[in-house]
Amino acid sequence: MKVKFLNSDGRELQEFKPIENGKVGLYCCGPTVYNYAHIGNMRPYTFEDVLRRTLEYAGYEVNHVMNVTDVGHLTDDGDEGEDKMIKSAREQGMSVWDIAEFFTKAFFHDTERLNINIPHHVCKATEHIDEMISMVKTLEDKGFTYTSGGNVYFDTAKFPEYGKMAGLDKQELQHGARTVVDTNKKNPQDFVLWFTKSKFENQAMTWNSPWGVGYPGWHIECSAMSSKYLGPHFDIHCGGIDHIPVHHTNEIAQSEAANGCKWVNYWLHNEFVIMKNGKMSKSKGGFLTVQDLVDKGYDAMDYRYFLLAGHYRSQLIFTWESLDAARTAREGLLKKTAQLKAEGVPVDPRDFSEAAEKVLKDFQDHISQDLNTPRCLADIWSCLKSNDISSGEKLGLLLDMDRILGLNLAEAELKEDLSGEALDSEIEAMIQQRQEARKNKDFALSDRIRDDLLARGIQIVDSPEGPKWKKN
RNA sequence: GGCGCCGUACCCAAGCGGCUAAGGGAGUGGAUUGCAAAUCCAUCAUUCAGCGGUUCGAGUCCGCUCGGCGCCUCCA
């Protein structure tokens, strides 16, 4: 299976060709663990999970690396603003290290609930300070840096390709519109590689360096860690679209300057999940976490389905109505899969009929065309509706397609008939009573009892085998 | 002010210039049911924000207008 991606670097659809035959080096920008991740934050990790599964499905051996930014970073690229970790620690009354650990755990709890595979290497910034220092040293030795006001800066004027991917080269960057200018910088695009001039009294996270005690600038970690785990030149780098102009632009500059070679072949960026009135953020309200959805009675996987229903490169509008739609669709899909499982065993794709093979081919075409997951979901439904495909083939198809979509169809089971489960005697009696009333055609009474039961959270469903119930 | 994205049915959302504009949800009609619920079947955009252009042919390309969003500050 040949896979095509829209490469942000050049903005065209390109067939994926690995550097090393059969292998893929994949680096994904991870979370900064100073707060809970909201559901918008979970989009890139879900998309990257589908990307990884697709590459594996296509037969590649993927080395998936993701950073965890657990070191404090300023809210600005100069020496201004406030350190997010310290701010959060102060607000929560915890140490910065505890903050990092707490929110890292919370993050992976969420990814687990979304059935996102854990990267092969999850690397913490605080455990790679030596690598970062060494890269800054290299940059200094090669003449790409200057020191000013105690901080080490990357000198973008020394790197002619600066801003190529973002299309910043011809553009006069307007700076200072919304932030205070860091007067230590020679150019507004320059960014800090190493801070020593921290104005924060109780900076908990500091390390010794050739430039004095301090801490790293936030772009350097991805460059240093990706080089360590994937080498100086690797295949794919992912992240949110917002990273293109600053973070990834700076990463490219420092990595290619330090390594002296091309850094990344394919850049894939996901768009945002937005609320009706715009971006999801704390200040605007609408900051929802996976846990919030669970608290409202949704399964985290409903949200995965919701994400899959939109293309990763398009803004996706979150509404409760569309999450409801995702839930209904996903539950129906699970139910149908469970029925197919009850009917028999899956047919191996190698033994597919022509009709089944066509669906599989369509699915593979769609996923390999820049991960068109909405189209893939449509393929799933057309598979289920087809009259030309046997049950065994349908099941075989679903399980095969789910290797990429990760909806856990293999685990789909028909809901056990709960009628066997013990109920308290009062409710048992009410159900009996209702049956009596029905037998006597006293439907007014039987319906009233049904309403009463519903009020107690017991929903009665009549069936040919008698009344069944489930908890609401 | 600069850069970029988008505007497809009630909602969400695909659509690489060319068969009848995917799919899900909601709705509607029917089957089934005492009635519900669930399920099944059917139905649901002569039309793609508006206007003009290119083309044998445009939702898809170009221009303009209107509207929405993102980025240029940390940010998925």
Image (spheres, rainbow, N blue to C red):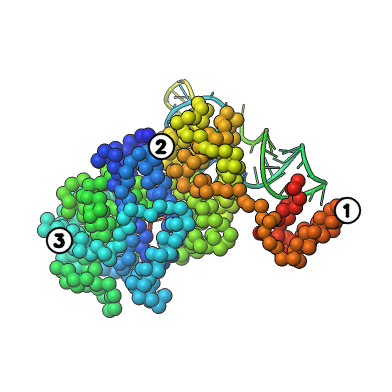
Q: Earlier in the sequence, mark 1 or mark 2?
A: 2
For label 2, the SS is: loop
Q: Are marks 1 and 2 on the same chain?
A: yes
Q: Residues within 10 Å of mark 1 (few under 14, many from 20)?
A: few
Q: Which residue is denoted by mark 2 in the rendering?
A: A369
Q: Is residue A198 above or below residue A12?
A: below
Q: A243 or A380: nearer the eye?
A: A380
Subunit ID for the residue under disc 3: A
* Cα separation between marks 2 and 3: 42 Å
**Circle number at residue A137:** 3
Q: Residues within 10 Å of mark 2 (few under 14, many from 20)?
A: some
Q: Would you say A371 lies left or right of B7 here? A: left
Q: Residues within 10 Å of mark 3 (few under 14, many from 20)?
A: some
Q: Which residue is denoted by mark 1 in the rendering?
A: A440
- Decide: marks 1, 2 in contact (CB < 8 A)? no
Q: Is residue A42 above or below residue A99?
A: above
Task: For the N terminus of chain A, give its image quadrant.
Answer: top left
Q: Residue shown at 25%/50% (left/top)? A: A230
Q: Residue shown at 84%/56% (left/top)? A: A436
Residue A309 spot, x, y in % from top left: 50, 45
